[in-house]
Image (tube, rainbow, N blue to C red):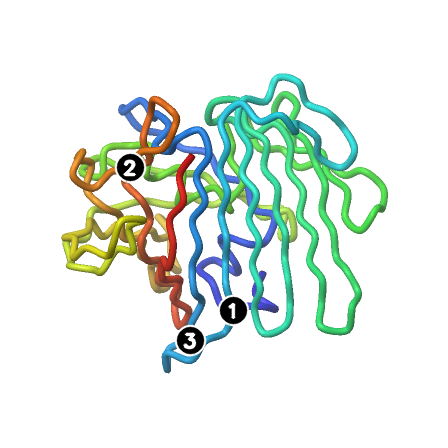
Amino acid sequence: MKKIIVLLICSLIFAGILAGCSGTETPYAAWADKETLTYSVADASGADRGEMTVVTVRNPSDKTVGGQEYSSADGRTDITLTFDGITEKVTILMKKFSAVAYSSEKTLADGSTETVTGYYSGKYFYYSENGGAEQKLKVGSSAYLPGEFLYNFVRCYPLESTPASMKIADIKEKRVATLTTTLYGRTTLTVPYPDGSKEVSCYAIAIGLAESPQGKPIYALYTPDSADYNVSGLSISPSKKIPVKMIENDITYTLTAIEVM
């Protein structure tokens, strides 16, 4: 959503982008039954520009998108971003790691809205913009994921062996591009755990275009895959490999709160 913030590849996260992957590792869920992550949003000067909340739920009771129920869904992610007076709400329904349905509603500063609602079937993503006629985008046979799910998806792999490549398809440009992920290194960050902040040596993953022009990569930093850094709630599985910070050109998302149920 480049009108709101400058992101890699003309808005990798909030633009109705789809993503698929290839690699030898098998992904596995890295969150508890319900996980809520809250982030501050700042520009290059450190000035506060907004907030982002990401809520991920296993086996959700609500499996509806755009008034349509998708009974096969076993996961749901709701993302709310506020940025300079603009609000975007995104809902993603998943079946394991394949997207089932998607919706985005952006409320502009003047009160007007822009919407995208869609679902996946076969090799296509069928969608409607602003309530208009249904369109379709061929995404192939890969298990494509909405770009808003990208950071959560990367953490479902070993941080030392993230997906070798991921496909994204921009419904605005009607194109598909390939992303690569690389373990960039480690850096120490302050993580706001529910029982008190801790200094943690986090993994930094660089995400960039595989083909030219590559541009500047974005970076996602995660807590290590260790019981010492997991967050447990009432569910059997804890939340792990938590995204602590994401750096996208001149915009930085910094984790401010973790809640796990």
Q: Quadrant of the C terminus?
A: top left
**As drawn, is 255 to the left or to the right of 69?**
left
Which element type, helix, strand or loop, lies under badge 3?
loop
| Residue holding disc 1 | 50
Q: Residue furthest top?
A: 72
Q: Residue at x 35, y 38 (%)?
A: 165
Q: CA distance from mark 1 to mark 3?
A: 10 Å
What percent of the width, then of the height, locates residue 138? 63, 33
Residue 94: x and y in percent read: 55, 28
- Residue at screen point 42% across, 69% down: 251
Using the numbered discs, state the Cα–Cα distance from disc 3 to disc 2 in whole angstroms: 27 Å
- Is 226 located above or below residue 1 in the figure? above
Q: Circle 2 sits in a helix, a strand or a loop, which is it? A: loop
Where is the N terminus found, in terms of image quarters?
Answer: bottom right
- Residue type at mark 3 is Asp
Q: Amino acid at mark 1?
A: Gly
- Name the residue located 49 percent from the left edge and 47 percent from the top edge: 54
> Amino acid under label 2?
Lys
**Label 3 crowd (10 A; few <14 / some 14-19 / many >=20):** some
Alpha-carbon span between mark 2 and mark 1: 25 Å
User: Mark 2 Cα within 10 Å, few/some/many (few <14, many 20+)?
Assistant: many
Instruction: Check contact, mark 3 vs mark 2: CB within 8 A.
Output: no
* Closer to the camera in the image, 195 or 249: 195
Q: Which mark is residue 43?
A: 3
The image quarter containing residue 112 is bottom right
**Circles 1 and 3 in contact, beta carbons < 8 Å:** no
> Which numbered dot is residue 240?
2
- Sequence-wise first label, 3 or 2: 3
